[in-house]
Image (cartoon, helix red, strand yellow):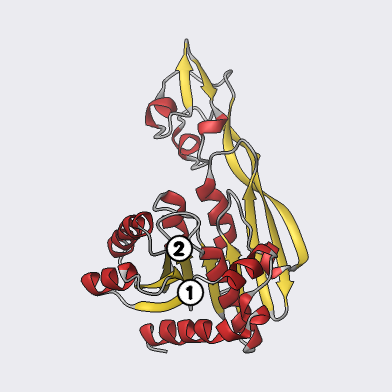
Amino acid sequence: MRIAVASGKGGTGKTFVATNLAALLTDMGEGVTLADCDVEEPNSRLFIKPEVMETCPVTIEVPVIDNDKCNGCRLCSTHCEFHALITVKSKTYVFEDMCHGCGFCMRICPEGAIGKRDKVIGTFMKGQFGRGLFMEAEMKVGTELATPVIKFVKDRLPSNGVVILDSPPGTSCPVVETMQGCDYVILVTEPTPFGINDLKLAVEMCRALDLKFGIVENRAMEGNTMVSDFCRSENTRLLASIPLEREIAECYSHGNLAIRELPAYRYRFVELLDAVKEELGQ
């Protein structure tokens, strides 16, 4: 079972849901992997506190031009979708910051004038928390390529057990990359106009990707029916509601897990897990 925890906007509580759900599974004796795919600002480790087992650089292959061989045909520069190459007066130059490491230019060069080298774009970390496995990657400062960093993490996920992916916020390419291949998506939202507006975008994204999904309402307020009304109008399941309570916010601000520090709220994550299993027919 591979589950992505996502949202249409930042600050709704994705990490709160992902970390508590992963911790609950380990407490239940389940084999679980939590992967923080919010590679621009990963923070799941602050709550999981894993014992680090491995770190390594995240790299992509960028082209290196041998201008002694280059005949200035412009085949590479005209076919690069990311405009990372330019040919001027029979010489080709590379803009590495624009290169996505696809390798297409290396394959189509008729003169074999394009080699490659590894460029570091981030750092990968793997650790252990109880019976659980934790993974994260963080982009190098100044790098703009989130998607290859996310792919690096996903390529190292185990094929067995439950995998929970803490997604980046929004509906852009990094989110799509995180969701692809998942069995289910938990969309976390809040009962505000901004929350509902961005939830609509996230729902449209899941439907466009043909992914099963359900909604978790975080910071739910008594008498506020914005999220439940939205779920009814979209024929979408409301998996769980987590109330707006000061003690939850204080627990989170200290880097602690609600299911362990606040037992009164543990059942809400048990209900969430049961609802996801029911949705998947497990």
Q: Position of residue 86 (x, y in %)?
A: 46, 21
- Please report the residue visible at 58 percent of the width from the left and 48 percent of the height from the top: 40
Q: Which mark is residue 196?
A: none
**In the rendered view, does 183 fall on the left or right side of 55?**
left
Q: Which image quadrant: the C terminus?
A: bottom left
> Which structural element holds mark 1?
strand
> Which structural element holds mark 2?
strand
Question: Does residue 178 appear anywhere in the picture?
Answer: yes
Q: Residue furthest top?
A: 89
Q: Where is residue 32 in the image (x, y as percent from the top left)?
A: 60, 78
Tag nearer the camera, 1 or 2: 1
- Total labels drawn: 2
Task: Say which residue label 2 marks.
Answer: 6
Q: Which of 30 and 169 is in front in this view?
A: 169
Callout 2: 10 Å neighbours few (<14), some, many (20+)?
many
**In the rendered view, does 138 fall on the left or right side of 206?**
right
- Which amino acid is tagged 2? Ala
Task: Say which residue label 1 marks.
Answer: 243
Q: Quick check: 206 above or below 161? A: above
Locate residue 254: give its quadrant: bottom right
Mark positioned earlier in the residue sequence (1 or 2): 2
- Which amino acid is tagged 1? Pro
Locate residue 27: give its quadrant: bottom right
Locate residue 75: give its quadrant: top left
Q: Quick check: 264 above or below 253? A: below
Q: Nearer the viewer, residue 174 or 63?
A: 174
Q: Where is residue 145 in the image (x, y as percent from the top left)?
A: 53, 42
Q: Position of residue 130 (x, y in %)?
A: 72, 79
Callout 1: 10 Å neighbours few (<14), some, many (20+)?
some
Give the Cα distance between marks 1 and 2.
19 Å
